[in-house]
Amino acid sequence: MNRALERFQPGLALLAAGGTLAVLLVIYQLARNGQLELALPLLIASVGALVLLRFPWAGFALLVASVPVQRLGAEGGPLPVTLTQLAFPVAIAGLVIGLAAGQPRLRGHALLIPYCALVLVMLASAVRAQSGSAALAEFARWAVALAAFWLALQFVVGSSRRMIAFVTLLALGGVFEATIGVLQSVLGAGPFQLQSGVSRAFGTFGKPNSYAGYLEMTLFPAVWLGVWYVAEYWRRLEIYRVARLQGMAASREQRLALARSVLMALLLLGSAAIILGGIVASLSRGAWLGVAVGALVTALLFGRTTRLVTITAIAAAGAIFLSGQTWLIPEDFRDRISASVDQVRPFNPANVVITDENFAAAERFAHWQAGLGMFQDYPLLGIGAGNFNTHYEDYSVRETFRHSQGHAHNFYIHTLAETGMLGLLAYLTLLGSVMALALRVLLSRYGRGSVARAVVLGAFGSIVAVAAHNVFEHLHVLNMGIVISLLWALVIAGHVGWRHDRLEETQRAA
């Protein structure tokens, strides 16, 4: 297909030049006639097309960046659609324009098979759907996430610079969201008030758990790529010291590389600190669990020193709790942790006495029980994608929890309820395949200091964190599937880079 496109590139370039000239003439004529309401959007679209012609990946970057601000376009704004819905065709246009210009090379991957299977199972489950519109909306969300995964394969795989650029984009998105959340918390601007006068952070996502889930997706790539840049600084410093002996002019390139390492380390690790602060401000116990699991796994995989530090930290935390010295932990956090321990103890929400302390746990268990009831009645394909809310009242176990909170408070049970055994099997196959690919890189003795391994480690940390958080939440909502798809694609990109580094290392050894 790429060879066929190459034959048409001269003609396409000529067509693009002629089209640009025609559009400029139309804009000029509209502006001359005073029709600025038509000239301005056309001008913006034309500039966007030129940007995509030079940087085809910019459309996909816009799609990823739109996720935290998606609701700003549709709620009380001038646009009838969300910013993410607006950015999606721009991302597709970027690929088309890039192909016409001969820049990207179409790529596929074996992980597209389970991903497509999952989306097809969702489509098949719609046969049982009571609400066709809800099923179509859910199918569309996953189809967009699948398209984002495919776009990421085209624009991220095969380029170390592009991997770094998209990790940086995730970090900046996390900083934006975390900053809003921390301000909400400090100013007590949210509806989720605590005894201390602060509120739980919820950012632009409206709910603390979804907000914290997005931040989890951006945290670990920033952390581990930042750590790689710290190591890169020391390597670059030694190279610079040798080059500096030849004079300032001769060492200019090495000096710039050293400065880039410092700036990127500060940017990424500083971003990670702000993102972590945003997660803490959310007071989301599911997110705390996810971050703890992600940090534990990645620290154990990184190297011998981090393994020792991790084991020591676990021992110290255990000693604090066993000795009863919990006064070292702030009261709000201590209460949340204590409540978390109580709420993981299973009980029957249908007949338990409801108190302020167990209300949240009872509501969660009621949704779990309803979801499992749907699965028991429709084990193969579920009750239909997107139809959990439609059927919830029929499976409600108690009048107190008669109304659905939007999902089953457990992504895996939610998937079982809506798409049955086939849906969960397809999802777990996809997730397990991504994790296995990451572990193949991370457990190898090759490429220990490569940027590819750092990117895989960061993406793997966030993937594990999201998987753990999904036990208590549904994080494939609000188009966060686009960011998750990017994380999965970063694992593939890192694996491709690792294979290249491994080949070079083997050839040098030979």
Image: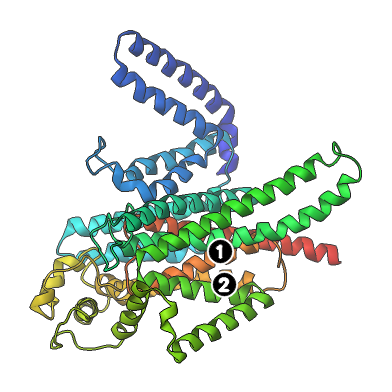
- Left or right position of 245 against 15: right
| Residue 113 in view, yes or no | yes
Query: What residue sits right under mark 2 in the picture?
Result: 298
Which x, y percent locates residue 127? Answer: 21, 65
Query: What residue sits right under mark 1 in the picture?
Result: 458
Task: Residue at 44%, 38% (x, y): give it.
Answer: 93
Which residue ends up furthest to the right in the rendered image?
246
Which quadrant: the N terminus? Answer: top right
Q: Quadrant of residue 348?
A: bottom left
Determine which of the numbered discs, if any, sits on residue 335 in the image: none
| Residue 128 in view, yes or no | no
Task: Residue at 45%, 78% (x, y): give it.
Answer: 328
Figure check: 345 above or below 102: below
Which residue ends up furthest to the top in the rendered image?
32
Foreground residue, 431 or 31? 31
Which residue ends up furthest to the bottom in the rendered image?
322
Figure check: 40 above or below 307: above
Figure check: 247 above or below 30: below
Which x, y percent locates residue 356? Answer: 18, 78
- Left or right position of 396 against 13: left
Which x, y percent locates residue 361? Answer: 24, 79
Q: Quadrant of residue 483?
A: bottom left
Identified by mark 1, the residue type is Gly
Identified by mark 2, the residue type is Thr
Task: Residue at 32%, 60% (x, y): give it.
Answer: 477
Crowding around mark 1 (Cα neighbors within 10 Å: few <14, some 14 to 19, many 20+) is many
SS for dot 2: helix
Which comes before the other along the chain, label 1 or label 2? 2
Inter-mark Cα distance, 1 to 2: 8 Å
Task: Residue at 77%, 57% (x, y): give it.
Answer: 235
Do callouts 1 and 2 mark residues in contact (Cβ within 8 Å)?
yes
Which quadrant: the C terminus? Answer: bottom right
